[in-house]
Structures are given as structure tokens and as C-alpha cells.
Image: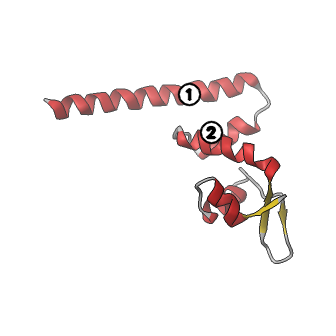
């Protein structure tokens, strides 16, 4: 079963432009592009796009997502995830400081 770019975007809470951008940067390509340039995706691609969406939801950069998903090296993947965890922990400390300042 194939889905148009609009259908795929809607199912994942994205815009068509986001999917076009993901294709442009090599993060997520359509399964097929017809002679008119229309992009089509398959159901088999959905778990991969859901993973991208989940990682973006964690505020991970597109570069890190691309590195993570394209790496076959388990240690490299752990390095990327640990780096993002450190970033999140730093952001959390900054937010706690801001909260403390606002409360007092």
C-alpha cells in the first residue's frame, strides 16, 4: 500500500515541507517518486518515520538523528544518545534555575 506525501505527513503530524526537507537532507526518502515528481511512501516506512518523530520529540537535532539511524556501530549510537542525555540534563538545570529565580 502506498501513501501520498500529504497522507504520510498527516498521519505523523508533520507538514509536506518537512518530508520534502527530510528527503533533501537524506534523512527519509520516499519509496517512489513518479514522473510528475509526486512522492509516495509505503507502510513499511512508517516505523522508521515514527522513530524520527520520536527522536525529534526528544529535541534531538536532525544531524544527530541522521547519525544515529545511519550508524551500524553500537558504540557510536550510545555516544550520540549519551551526548543528547547530557544536553537534556543541562537544559533541565537551566530550567530549574529559571524556576528558582522566578519563584523568589
Give the mark nearer the N terminus: 1 vs 2: 2
- 102, 4: nearer the viewer: 4
Where, by quadrant of the figure, is residue 64 drawn? top right
Where, by quadrant of the figure, is residue 77 drawn? top right
Residue at 41% in and 28% down: 90
Q: Considering the image in quadrants, where does the C terminus appear? A: top left
Pointer 2: what residue?
64
> Residue furthest toward the bottom?
36
Q: Is residue 98 above or below residue 48?
A: above
Residue count near mark 2 (Cα–Cα under 10 Å), binned few <14, some 14–19, many ≥20: some
Q: Position of residue 30 (x, y in %)?
A: 78, 58
SS class of the residue under badge 2?
helix
For residue 85, side relative to residue 21 (left or right): left
Pointer 1: what residue?
83
Q: How many numbered marks does the figure carry?
A: 2
Q: Position of residue 35 (x, y in %)?
A: 86, 76
Residue at 77% in and 26% down: 73
Mark on residue 32? Answer: none
For residue 10, side relative to residue 36 (left or right): left
CB under 8 Å between discs 1 and 2 = yes
> Residue furthest toward the left?
104
Q: Is residue 34 above or below residue 10?
A: below
Where, by quadrant of the figure, is residue 69 drawn? top right
Q: Is residue 95 above or below residue 52?
A: above
Amino acid at each position: 500500500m502506498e501513501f501520498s506525501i500529504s497522507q504520510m505527513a498527516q498521519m505523523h503530524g508533520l507538514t509536506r515541507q518537512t518530508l520534502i526537507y527530510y528527503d533533501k537532507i537524506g534523512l527519509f526518502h520516499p519509496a517512489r517518486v513518479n514522473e510528475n515528481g509526486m512522492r509516495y511512501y509505503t507502510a513499511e516506512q512508517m516505523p522508521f518515520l515514527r522513530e524520527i518523530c520520536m527522536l525529534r520529540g526528544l529535541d534531538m537535532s536532525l544531524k544527530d538523528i541522521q547519525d544515529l539511524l545511519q550508524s551500524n556501530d553500537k558504540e557510536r549510537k550510545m555516544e550520540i544518545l549519551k551526548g543528547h542525555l547530557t544536553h537534556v540534563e543541562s537544559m533541565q538545570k537551566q530550567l530549574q534555575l529559571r524556576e528558582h529565580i522566578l519563584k523568589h
